[in-house]
Image (spheres, rainbow, N blue to C red):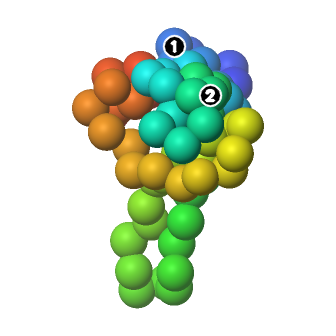
Amino acid sequence: MGKSGDTAGPIPKEIHGKACPFCGGDTYQLILRGASVSDASSLFVRCCRCSHPGNVDAEFKSTLWI
């Protein structure tokens, strides 16, 4: 963040969550997608082991404080 007094740290690149239903991995990457300027951005997760995408559910939202 910087010297402005913000207390929040950087967003983690990888987070741990429940086991992936496809491969059993529990580490995920955060993916921010925005289709165009007029569309809202969407936050997704992708399994680090098998790359299967998923939605940010309540578990990840509580980890990320959103």
Residue 65 visible in the current orientation:
no
**Mark nearer the viewer, 1 or 2:** 2
Q: Nearer the viewer, residue 54 or 19?
A: 19
Residue contact at pointers 1 and 2, CB within 8 angstroms: no
Q: Amino acid at mark 1?
A: Thr
Crowding near the residue tagged with mark 2, few <14, some 14–19, many ≥20 C-alpha atoms within 10 Å: some
The quadrant of the rendering that contains the C terminus is top left
Q: Which residue is the site of mark 2?
A: 25
Residue 64, how many percent across, how many down?
43, 27
Q: Which residue is the site of mark 1?
A: 7
Which element is circle 1 on?
loop
Q: Nearer the viewer, residue 52 or 65?
A: 52
Measuring 31% from the left and 39% from the top, which residue is drawn there?
Answer: 57
Q: Give the left or right position of residue 30, taking residue 18 as reference.
A: right
Residue 44 visible in the current orientation:
yes
Is 12 drawn above or below residue 29 in the view shown?
A: above
Measuring 38% from the left and 71% from the top, which residue is drawn there?
Answer: 40
Measuring 54% from the left and 54% from the top, which residue is drawn there?
Answer: 53
Measuring 54% from the left and 43% from the top, which residue is drawn there?
Answer: 22
Residue 50, how many percent across, how many down?
69, 45
Q: Give the left or right position of residue 27, taking residue 39 as reference.
A: right
Crowding near the residue tagged with mark 1, few <14, some 14–19, many ≥20 C-alpha atoms within 10 Å: few
The quadrant of the rendering that contains the N terminus is top right
Q: Quadrant of residue 10?
A: top right
Which element is circle 2 on?
loop
